C-alpha cells in the first residue's frame, strides 16, 4: 500500500517539474527575442547617478563680508564651520567646496582664512562665484526660446474683468443676528446635583 502511494505521489511531481522546466525555458527564449527586437536595452536605460556635494559653498558676497581683524566666532558666523581645521595649524581654516555632477566638469573652490591669535589676519581664495552665478550653474535644464513676460497689460486686465463672473463672496448675504439667549451655566438653586 505504501509503495503504491509513493508511486502515485512521485508521478505528478515528476510531471509538474517537467512542465515547470519547459515553461521556464520558453520564458528565457521569449525574453531573448524581446530584447533583440527592442535593440540594445543597456543603452536606453541608464542608472540614476546622484550629484555629490562636499564641503562648504562660500559665495563672493560672503567673502566680501569678512574683514581683517574679525574674531574667529564672527568669521564662523559668516562663512560657516570650516571643512578642515588642523591641529598642527590652529590659526588656519580651510573652506573647500567640491561639486560633482555626472556629465559636467567638476566644480572645486578653496578659501583659506589665516588668523593671528583670535583675529583674522588675511584670506586667500580661488575666484568665487556670486550666489546667483552658482545657482545658475546648477540649473541643467535647456532653455528654449524667450522667457515669457509675466506681466499683464492694461487691455488684458480690462478684458479679464469684463469676463469675470461674480463669485460667491461678491454676492450680498444677510448677516446672521447674534445669539442673545444662552442656557444658564449653573443649575437653578435647589436643583439636586447628579
Image (spheres, grey):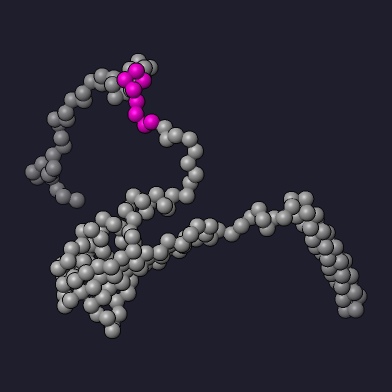
How many numbered discs sit on the rendered protein?
A: 0
Q: Residue at point 29% right, 70% down?
A: 112
Q: Left or right: where does residue 66 sit relative to residue 145?
A: left
Q: Nearer the viewer, residue 93 or 124?
A: 124
Furthest residue in direction left, as rendered: 189
Specify the quadrant of the image occupied by residue 54. Answer: bottom left
Furthest residue in direction top, as rendered: 162
What is the x, y in percent for residue 75?
Answer: 21, 66
Residue 155: in magenta span:
yes
Q: Left or right: where does residue 50 sit relative to residue 110?
A: right
Q: Nearer the viewer, residue 91 or 186?
A: 91
Q: Residue at point 31% right, 72% down?
A: 94
Magenta region: 149-156
Q: Residue at point 31% right, 20% down?
A: 154
What is the x, y in percent for residue 169?
Answer: 29, 24
146 w.r.t. 7: above or below: above
Give the quarter of the figure containing the N terminus: bottom right
Furthest residue in direction bottom, as rendered: 88
- Residue 119 in view, yes or no: yes
Residue 14: in magenta span:
no
Main secondary structure type of the part rendered in magenta: loop
What is the x, y in percent for residue 71?
Answer: 16, 70
Specify the quadrant of the image occupied by residue 5. Answer: bottom right
What is the x, y in percent for residue 171?
Answer: 29, 19
Q: Left or right: where does residue 136 sit relative to residue 172?
A: right
Amino acid at each position: 500500500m505504501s509503495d503504491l502511494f509513493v508511486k502515485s505521489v512521485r508521478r505528478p511531481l515528476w510531471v509538474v517539474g517537467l512542465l515547470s522546466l519547459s515553461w521556464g525555458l520558453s520564458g528565457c527564449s521569449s525574453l531573448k527575442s524581446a530584447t533583440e527586437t527592442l535593440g540594445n536595452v543597456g543603452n536606453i536605460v541608464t542608472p540614476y547617478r546622484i550629484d555629490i556635494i562636499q564641503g562648504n559653498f562660500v559665495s563672493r558676497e560672503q567673502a566680501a563680508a569678512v574683514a581683517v581683524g574679525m574674531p574667529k566666532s564672527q568669521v564662523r558666523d559668516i562663512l560657516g564651520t570650516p571643512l578642515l581645521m588642523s591641529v598642527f595649524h590652529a590659526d588656519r581654516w580651510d573652506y573647500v567646496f567640491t561639486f560633482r555632477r555626472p556629465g559636467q566638469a567638476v566644480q572645486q573652490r578653496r578659501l583659506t582664512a589665516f588668523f593671528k591669535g583670535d583675529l583674522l589676519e588675511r584670506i586667500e581664495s580661488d575666484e568665487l562665484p556670486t550666489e546667483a552665478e552658482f545657482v545658475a550653474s546648477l540649473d541643467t535644464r535647456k532653455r528654449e526660446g524667450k522667457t515669457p513676460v509675466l506681466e499683464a497689460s492694461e487691455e488684458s486686465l480690462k478684458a479679464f474683468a469684463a469676463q469675470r463672473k461674480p463669485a460667491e463672496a461678491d454676492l450680498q448675504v444677510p448677516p446672521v443676528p447674534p445669539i442673545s439667549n444662552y442656557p444658564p451655566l449653573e443649575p437653578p438653586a435647589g436643583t439636586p446635583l447628579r
